[in-house]
Structures are given as structure tokens and as C-alpha cells.
Image: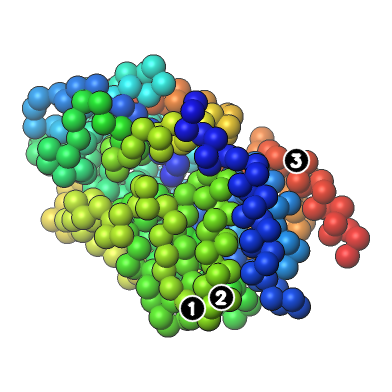
Amino acid sequence: MRFIDEYRDADKARMLASQIRELCEPGRTYTFMEVCGGHTHTIYKHGLEDYLPEAVTLVHGPGCPVCVIPMGRIDDAMAIARRPEVIMTSFGDMMRVPGGQGSFLDAKAAGADIRMVYSPLDALKIARTNPDRAVVFMGIGFETTAPSTAMTVLRAAAEGIANFSVFCNHVTIIPAIKAILDSPDQRLDGFIGPGHVSTVIGCRPYEFIAREYGKPLVCAGFEPLDVLQSIYLLLRQLAEGRAEVENQYTRVVPWDGNRRALEVISQVMEPRPYFEWRGLGFISHSALRMREAYAAFDAERIFEVPGVRVADPKACQCGEVLKGVLKPWECKVFGTACTPETPIGTCMVSSEGACAAYYNFGRFTRRRIKETSRT
Amino acid sequence: MCLGIPGEIIELIPGPADLATVDVVGVRRAINIGLLGEGEVRPGDWVLVHVGFAMSKIDEAEAAATLALLTGLGQAYTDELEALAESDIT
């Protein structure tokens, strides 16, 4: 593995850390949000906070697709899945996410035909081989997975597969970032931009953050040095009085994104007027639904969906965690009532969730808990 | 789901479905390459695979780094690889 060292070099990390320290103005504190759950994972896995001066705080954002699905949508999906003619298909991450009436796994145990798939194309194949059943794909994810769902629908249309449909829960990252920027308890100095969402949408859509909110954003890769370098770039912008969108992850993210993927999304899907996000509430134009032209593949139109709203469990503070207001360990049920085995909140379910990342890399958790209890 | 797994294109599968065989750490599976530009990938190229679709072309160094990062994820990566191994989209 001759390539890895350049992204993992501890000396380089220390050098970057000292440059980061030099850029911090004495007496000033900096709070950056890492929007993407993948970054959260890197930060805790490699203990990056230990490299950072105390003046720099990282908070987690809403970029974990499973985490932001509201309980009501899971209950709606469950209502479809319980129909005898339906085979519900879903990514593995989704299986344990609790709705108001349990999770997909619970429903499966109770007899519903719910199958885990790796790709929406697997779901399409199940439809092809089970022509007498209605196969529904639970579409979740940001712009990283939305093109795949859209492309699968186009495939189904081209092949004339009539027993395939999508229960569309795809969400878009920009309105969520805007909602966080507009929230009154927000005190962010900049953003570590999501890596893979940006391979699809590119860097341009973030420009309003710099222009209208005066905050820098750096699209970042997932290696420890990528994240440190992005923090350095953010601090350098602030030190120089700039607020711009920069691309640290040029080796994967093109400035203009993936045009073909964007075209496919907008051919099949359109923005919903509003969508509920767990913890963040209703956000305008923040999710996608199937266009009228693809109504035949839209599970929401084909089946009666109750459209339930379920309040999050009282004890669960995923909302605050997703907005970056609370650290996972500050949640009342973290690690006690809520664990990856028996999650109460979504942030504990997905490996991309902030709480699961903290929980799995416990050494940091314990240290931070000690710190918190001292203050 | 959002990390994406690097895979090496082994061969393009002829037909209207835009498929190609990729090798992901020894696991060979068909994936869809329709989200990349026409003629953009050839055998020997590396792509980042998200839920069965090549989402971007990457170089070999990036592929190796990403694979190492994913291996470090432990269970999450194992789950993703197992899911990929069970995937059969052809």
C-alpha cells in the first residue's frame, strides 16, 4: 500500500497541526461544522481533535442520510411493506432505524417481506424475477445516491417493468445547510464540505454560503490529512478576511460536479415543496419526489401512504446533535438507553451517524465525557 | 453508503444497460457506468462505486488510499463489501 503514507503521515499531520495553531488568533475561538458523516467517522477514528488547538471546535452536521429520515416516513414505508403483495427493498443501513412502530427488521420478523439490497438495481432485478409481486425500493440518501435511484427508474421504464416503484425519500444538502445557517442558535465559522455529495453537485452550489453568509467552505477528502488540511484552509481564509468556496478534494471532486448525474436526477425527480427532517423540522424544497411523468414508478402514488407524523422520542436529542448544538455524549441517553444494538435515535444507527462514531471509538468518548464532567 | 468503494474496471459489458465488470478487492461484480460520460471509462480505469453505480473516475493512488480508509472502518466496510458481493444486477 505505497500510496497511503502520503495521506497518513504523522509528521505531516503534526506539521499541519502547528500551522493550524499559528493561524488561530489569540483569544478567538473557531467552530467548524463537518457536514458529512464520513468526515465525522475520520475525525473520531483518528482522534483528529487531539491534533487541534483548544480554540478549534468541530461540530457534526446533518450529512447522514439515515439519521435525518423522520419517524413518520419509516411508518409510511412500513405501511407499504406490510401489504401482502409487496416486497420492500432497502439498503442495510435503514433496516434498524426505528420508526414509531419499530424498524424494518421488526416488521420483517413479524412476517413482512423486506429484503436488504446493495443497489437499487438489485431491487429492479427482484422485480424482474417476481412479476406477480410489487417491488418497492426505499430510496434514501443525498445527491450521492439519488442519481442511482433515478437511473434505476429510467431502466425500469426502458424495460417496461411495471411492478417496480420507489418510495422516494431522497434529500438535498443545500437547503439543510441553509436551515442550519438560518437557525438562531448557530454560531459556525465555516464548513468542511461533504466530499462525495460534491462529486455530483460540484462546488458552485455552496457559493451562497460565502457570498450571503460570509462563511468559508472547503470541500474535503476523507483521509485524516485531508480533514486537517481543510481546517487549515478554513483558518487561512478567516485570517486573511476571505470567505470563499475552496476545493481540497480536487482529486475526486470536479468543480462543476457530475452533469450527467444531475440531469438524470432532474429528469426523474423534482423538489418537494417541503420535507420533514429528523430534528431539523420542515425545510422547504429540501427533498425530492418523483415527477408526474414517472408516476407509474412512484410508490407514494401507487399505494395509500398514511402520511403520519410521529414526534421523536422525548429522551432522544438527535435533532440537537444533527444541528451541531449538542455533542453526542451530551445527549441524555447516549451510551446508556441508546446504543448501536438498541438505538433510540437515528444518529446511533448508521455507521455515518455521529453518535455511532463516538460510541465505536470509545476512547475519545470517555476522555470527552471526563472533560465535560469537569466543566 | 456515502463513502463509496473504489473498483477497477475489468471489462465493459455490451448492451443497452451501461454495465461493466469491476474488481473490488477480489470481488467481481457488475456495476452501472451510465452516470459517467460515454467512453469515459476503459478497462484498467478506477472508479468510485456508490450503491452499484460508478459515480466518478479516480486515479489508482486515490483508490488505494480510499481502500485503506475503508478497511479501517471495520464492520461498516465489511457490511458494505458483503452487500456488494451479494449484489447481482445483470
Q: Secondary structure at mark 3?
A: helix
Residue holding disc 2: A238
Name the residue: 19% across, 51% down.
A260
Name the residue: 37% across, 53% down.
A250
Task: Name the foreground residue: A78 vs A351.
Answer: A351
Within 10 Å of disc 1 (Cα), the crowding (few <14, some 14-19, many 20+) is some
- Where residue A50 sits: x, y (%)? 73, 51
Can you say which quadrant of the picture contains the C terminus of chain A?
bottom right
As displayed, is residue A15 above or below residue A104?
A: below
Q: Secondary structure at mark 2?
A: helix
Numbered disc in front, either 3 or 2: 2
Does label 3 lie on the same chain as label 1? yes
| Kind of residue at badge 1 | Arg
| Disc 1 + disc 2, Cβ < 8 Å | yes
Checking the image for residue A362, the label placed there is 3
| Kind of residue at badge 3 | Gly
Residue holding disc 1: A242
- Chain of residue at mark 2: A
Q: CA distance from mark 3 to mark 2?
A: 33 Å
